[in-house]
């Protein structure tokens, strides 16, 4: 059974790269570019794992994460966060909010795959 | 031999000459070469608008009928001028400090900016002045007729009514052209005033020339004249030439009152006054002028009586005497003198009345149709105001013309003049009381004015239409319903008085009595008290108005409104200056009470005090005045006011310094935060394209896509993102070089149009993509520049592509307007989107201050920061222009000159 992954990323080129890498690895990938409607997109897609960018139009990745963690149906969803602002404070904030993995851009493709596989237990 | 056509031709030439004088003076004033215009002599000569055709022709007639009585008409103004230190000085000071535009505005402003009073005084002035204008039309047509008479050879006897229409129409045209060419905040008309001064000289020279001809040419010198005088005294009816004390005092007082309250006199005395010191000169020069004007009146009268056939109208001796002796040149000069007297009066009076009618009647009505609307609704106020003025001028002259038609032009000139005088003199109690008595109240002024005016109309104005006119002979003789005490010309049984003195006595006595009584009984409003203190103590402290505090008002709204009324440039410059005074940058000062007060006075100059007050109150959301605040100000003693104003000045200074300090402090803190934010931003901006590059290059390294098309696409993404990265680095480097000031400029000569063409060509792809229309006026763009036009084009490119990307209108439009202001070029870029929100306006020139997060728009938010640095290097500036329809940016820079060394020194020496 293919694993579902949802990518929330507003930079189209980065979203395309992640889609390609994951599809080739056998994942079923869907993407979403807006921060405002991201939580609803998660509910609709019901992915096994979520890749979440921080700087999104309308609503930041941190706020989205907070919303996900406070709702029953998404509380346990594994989340991998991606940010271009790789400062220590950013990582700390993400961890406090309950992120599962945190990666800074640019990332290594294989490392991302490893992280995802670990998150879904395979 | 003078023909009718020559006469008309000379008149036309004369009017054209006046046009030229007025035009040149206006132009000079605009270039602020005003030294010659502010000279006290011009001021003094402009006061001669007092001497109308009535004084020019009528004084001789008056002298022929009543001997020396005509002197009273000159005596009143002379006394006022000599006593200028006590009354006129205060009047002029109040007029200047309150930016008063007319006598109606003065009275309205003094009594709590009451528009009711403004309307009342305006009506009195219009009713009082209409007969006077009719009188001028009559005198001009009569003088035409004099030439026509006895000389039927070659003369077509002109149609008098036709002549009057032409004269009225011509005067309306001249007045509109020079009185309402544009709106001046001070309501000053340098051109007109100068033309009036020229006319003053013409009438003086004309009258003296006729006088000299009469005395030494035909009258046989001083001896001949005194003989003629004795003869005239003997021939005159019993008592006509003897002095009547009551009438003398009454007429002298009347002419003094009229000198102060006639709308045209108020216009030249107070409104057109540029410098208070002019009064000191005028105080002796104007009486001297009046003395010269009156010098030959008696000789002309007695010689006329002795030589001319019986039944000749003495009002026209000035003309008929030279004509009788066939002195055509002299007659022509006398005719021009009379023409000057009439035209100058009509022009100034109609300007003054038009200002009053449009400010106190038309504008308030227009404003009331706009109750509750926002500032942007004042868009057409300026045009409406100008049209209102023009319409009023035409209306006033039409009124004068119809009065002339109806009254038939029969009454003696002097009589109409005195009736007008007595009518407008009713304003005197309210005006003088307002200047000297703090207890004078609005209710008192209104009641006094209505009382005085009604009595004037009943005892003098209505009876003046004659027994067949408004009042029946029976009513005049026995009073209405046979009540003798109410006889119009013998009120309360006071019989045997001269009608003018009788009317003046009762109307002013009752006017004053009602005014004082009601003032004592009524309680003035806080605003009235404040204005009372400002008027009465104007000489002790001409400090700033205090007393209102508005916090909610947004100064942007006020700016939008002010732009509609003052015109964009003037309003922007004024707001910028005010902001600077507060220690702030940009166009939006804080809405302090002081600022609001100043804005109100500034606008008063254009639309009148009451209207300006109402307009601002409307914008400020109907915020009312704090009563305690006002009472505190109004009741403070002069000393305390003095102290407070000193302390205020100090405090203002401190506040300004504190504000500047805190602004610097804030800036420093901001800079530190900005530095961190900048690094974090740079990190983000660099990492984003790098992420794509790394991800796709790893994909390629690991074998890439099987589909060759996908592989090619991946390679092109890598390419595009590298370009984006390079561009970002270029921008960063550009900005860093600009900020460190080590930039090399390559100035050259180029026409703005070409620079704009280049910028638009460079942005054509984004313009096409976003479907934006650019509006330009290419004929304005032919200004040659000497500067680094490549850098300038870079700024233009940025602004154009920003408009294309960020304008959120459906049908995107960008207007580019080019103007030259002094030695500077000004280019405005205004789009039709929703603009930049007020809170972001100060941020947009900072680095990475993209308002939306859409990276898709391209660029990293460095564009405007680079523009600002470039304009700084070009000795220019780029600012956000608030209060426009959409986002608006203004670029200004010096036009520059081509120095013989190839570059201007301020640009530095980079190569030889």
Image: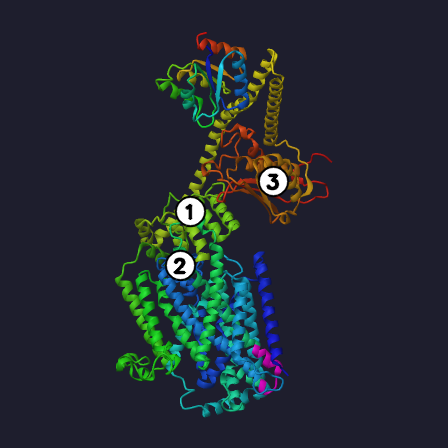
Q: Which mark is residue B891?
A: none
Residue B365: give its label. 2
Queried whether the magenta region covers residue B332, the answer comes back as yes
Earlier sequence position, callout 2 versus callout 3: 2
Instruction: Find numbered disc 1 in the image and state the secondary structure of the residue it sits on.
Output: helix
Nearer the N terminus, badge 1 or badge 2? 2
Classify B4 as above or below B898.
Answer: below
**Residue B471 quadrant:** bottom left
Of badges 2 and 3, nearer the viewer stands 2
> Could you classify mark 3 by the number of other residues whose Cα lies within 10 Å: few (under 14), some (14-19), or many (20 or more)?
some
In the figure, is residue B555 to the left or right of B325?
left
Q: In the image as oriented, which residue stretches furthest toward the top?
A: A122
Looking at the image, residue B51 lies above or below residue B766? below
Q: Residue at x 41, y 61 (%)?
A: B360
Residue B452 magenta-drawn?
no
Q: Position of residue B424 (x, y in %)?
A: 40, 70
Task: Rate crowding at label 2 as few (under 14), some (14 to 19) or many (20 or more) other CA atoms within 10 Å.
Answer: few
Magenta stretch in the rendered image:
B323-335
Q: Position of residue B4 (x, y in %)?
A: 60, 80
Nearest the viewer among B712 and B395 is B712
The C terminus of chain B appears in which quarter of the rendering?
Answer: top right
- Quadrant of the drawing holding the N terminus of chain B: bottom right
Query: Pointers 1 and 2 in contact (CB under 8 A)?
Result: no
**Of callouts 3 and 1, which one flags the residue occurring earlier in the amino acid sequence?**
1
Q: What is the distance, in whole Å, between disc 3 and disc 1 at their CAs?
A: 34 Å
Q: Check chain identity for marks 3 and 1: say if they share one.
A: yes
Q: Of the residues tagged 3 and 1, which is closer to the observer?
A: 3
Colouring: rainbow
Q: Give the dominant element type of the magenta stretch: helix, strand or loop.
A: helix
Q: Which residue position holds label 1?
A: B649
Which is nearer the eye, B899 or B363?
A: B363
């Amino acid at each position: 059974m293919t694993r579902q992954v949802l990518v929330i990323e507003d930079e189209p080129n980065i979203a395309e790269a992640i889609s390609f890498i994951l599809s080739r690895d056998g994942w079923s990938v869907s993407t979403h570019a807006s921060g405002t409607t991201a939580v609803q997109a998660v509910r609709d897609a019901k992915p096994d794992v979520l890749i979440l960018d921080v700087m999104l139009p309308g609503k930041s990745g941190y706020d989205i994460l907070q919303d996900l963690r406070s709702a029953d149906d998404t509380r346990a969803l594994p989340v991998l966060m991606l940010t271009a602002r790789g400062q220590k404070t950013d990582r700390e904030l993400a961890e406090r909010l309950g992120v599962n993995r945190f990666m800074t851009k640019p990332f290594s493709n294989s490392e991302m795959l490893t992280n995802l596989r670990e998150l879904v237990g395979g | 031999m003078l023909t009718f056509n020559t006469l008309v031709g000379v008149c036309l030439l004369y009017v054209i000459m006046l046009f030229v004088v007025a035009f040149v003076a206006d132009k000079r004033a605009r270039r602020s070469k005003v030294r010659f215009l502010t000279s006290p002599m011009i001021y003094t000569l402009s006061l001669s608008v007092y001497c109308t055709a009535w004084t020019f022709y009528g004084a001789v007639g008056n002298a022929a009928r009543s001997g020396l009585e005509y002197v009273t008409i000159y005596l009143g103004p002379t006394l006022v001028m000599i006593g200028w230190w006590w009354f006129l000085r205060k009047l002029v000071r109040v007029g200047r400090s309150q930016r008063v535009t007319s006598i109606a505005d003065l009275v309205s402003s003094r009594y709590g900016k009451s528009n009711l009073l403004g309307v009342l005084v305006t009506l009195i002035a219009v009713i009082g002045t209409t007969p006077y204008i009719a009188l001028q039309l009559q005198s001009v047509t009569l003088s035409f007729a004099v030439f026509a008479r006895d000389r039927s050879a070659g003369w077509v006897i002109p149609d008098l009514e036709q002549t009057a229409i032409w004269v009225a129409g011509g005067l309306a045209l001249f007045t509109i052209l020079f009185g309402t060419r544009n709106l001046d905040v001070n309501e000053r008309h340098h051109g007109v005033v100068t033309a009036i001064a020229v006319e003053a000289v013409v009438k003086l020279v004309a009258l003296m020339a006729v006088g000299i001809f009469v005395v030494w040419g035909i009258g046989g010198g001083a001896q001949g004249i005194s003989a003629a005088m004795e003869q005239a005294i003997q021939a005159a009816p019993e008592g006509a030439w003897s002095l009547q004390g009551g009438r003398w005092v009454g007429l002298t007082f009347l002419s003094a009152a009229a000198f102060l309250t006639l709308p045209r006199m108020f216009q030249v005395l107070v409104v057109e006054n540029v410098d208070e010191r002019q009064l000191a000169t005028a105080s002796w020069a104007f009486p001297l002028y009046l003395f010269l004007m009156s010098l030959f009146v008696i000789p002309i009268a007695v010689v006329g009586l002795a030589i001319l056939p019986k039944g000749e109208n003495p009002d026209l001796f000035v003309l008929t005497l030279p004509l009788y002796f066939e002195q055509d040149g002299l007659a022509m000069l006398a005719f021009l003198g009379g023409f000057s007297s009439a035209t100058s009066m009509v022009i100034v009076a109609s300007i003054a009345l038009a200002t009053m009618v449009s400010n106190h009647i038309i504008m308030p009505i227009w404003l009331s149709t706009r109750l509750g609307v926002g500032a942007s609704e004042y868009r057409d106020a300026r045009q409406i105001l100008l049209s209102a003025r023009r319409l009023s001028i035409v209306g006033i002259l039409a009124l004068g013309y119809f009065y002339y038609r109806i009254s038939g032009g029969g009454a003696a000139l002097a009589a109409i003049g005195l009736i007008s005088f007595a009518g407008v003199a009713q304003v005197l109690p309210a005006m003088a009381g307002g200047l000297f008595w703090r207890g004078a109240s609005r209710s008192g002024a209104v009641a006094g004015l209505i009382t005085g005016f009604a009595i004037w109309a009943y005892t003098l104005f209505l009876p003046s239409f004659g027994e067949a006119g408004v009042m029946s002979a029976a009513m005049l003789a026995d009073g209405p319903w046979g009540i003798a005490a109410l006889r119009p010309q013998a009120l309360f049984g006071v019989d045997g008085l001269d009608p003018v003195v009788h009317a003046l006595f009762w109307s002013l006595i009752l006017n004053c009595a009602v005014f004082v009584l009601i003032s004592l009984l009524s309680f003035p409003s806080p605003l009235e008290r404040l204005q009372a203190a400002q008027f009465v103590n104007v000489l002790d402290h001409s400090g700033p108005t205090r007393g209102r505090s508005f916090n909610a008002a947004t100064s942007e709204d006020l700016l939008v409104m002010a732009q509609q009324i003052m015109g964009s440039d003037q309003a922007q410059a004024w707001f910028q200056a005010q902001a600077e005074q507060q220690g702030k940058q940009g166009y939006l000062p804080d809405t302090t009470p002081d600022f609001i007060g100043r804005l109100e006075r500034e606008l008063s100059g254009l639309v009148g005090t009451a209207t300006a007050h109402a307009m601002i109150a409307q914008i400020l959301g109907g915020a009312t005045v704090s009563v305690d605040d006002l009472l505190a100000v109004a009741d403070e003693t002069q000393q305390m006011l003095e102290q407070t104003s000193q302390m205020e000045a100090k405090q203002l200074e401190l506040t300004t310094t504190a504000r500047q300090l805190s602004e610097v402090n804030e800036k420093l803190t901001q800079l530190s935060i900005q530095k961190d934010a900048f690094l974090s931003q740079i990190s983000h901006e660099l990492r984003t394209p790098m992420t794509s590059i790394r991800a796709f290059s790893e994909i390629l390294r690991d074998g890439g896509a099987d589909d060759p098309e996908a592989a090619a696409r991946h390679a092109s993404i890598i390419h595009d993102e590298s370009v984006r990265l390079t561009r970002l680095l270029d921008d960063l480097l550009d900005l860093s070089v600009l900020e460190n000031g080590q930039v090399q400029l390559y100035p050259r000569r180029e026409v703005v149009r070409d620079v704009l063409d280049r910028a638009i060509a460079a942005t054509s792809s984004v313009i096409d993509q976003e479907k934006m229309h650019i509006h330009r006026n290419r004929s304005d763009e032919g200004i040659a520049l000497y500067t680094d036009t490549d850098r300038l084009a870079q700024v233009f490119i940025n602004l154009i592509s920003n408009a294309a990307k960020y304008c959120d209108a459906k049908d995107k439009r960008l207007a580019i307007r080019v103007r030259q202001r002094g030695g500077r070029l000004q280019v405005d870029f205004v789009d039709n989107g929703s603009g930049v929100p007020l809170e972001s306006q100060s941020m947009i020139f900072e680095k990475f201050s993209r308002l939306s997060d859409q990276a898709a728009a391209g660029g990293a938010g460095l564009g405007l920061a680079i523009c600002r640095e470039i304009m700084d290097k070009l000795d220019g500036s780029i600012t956000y222009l608030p209060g426009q329809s959409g986002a608006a940016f203004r670029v200004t820079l010096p036009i520059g000159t081509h120095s013989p060394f190839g570059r201007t020194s301020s640009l530095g020496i980079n190569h030889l």
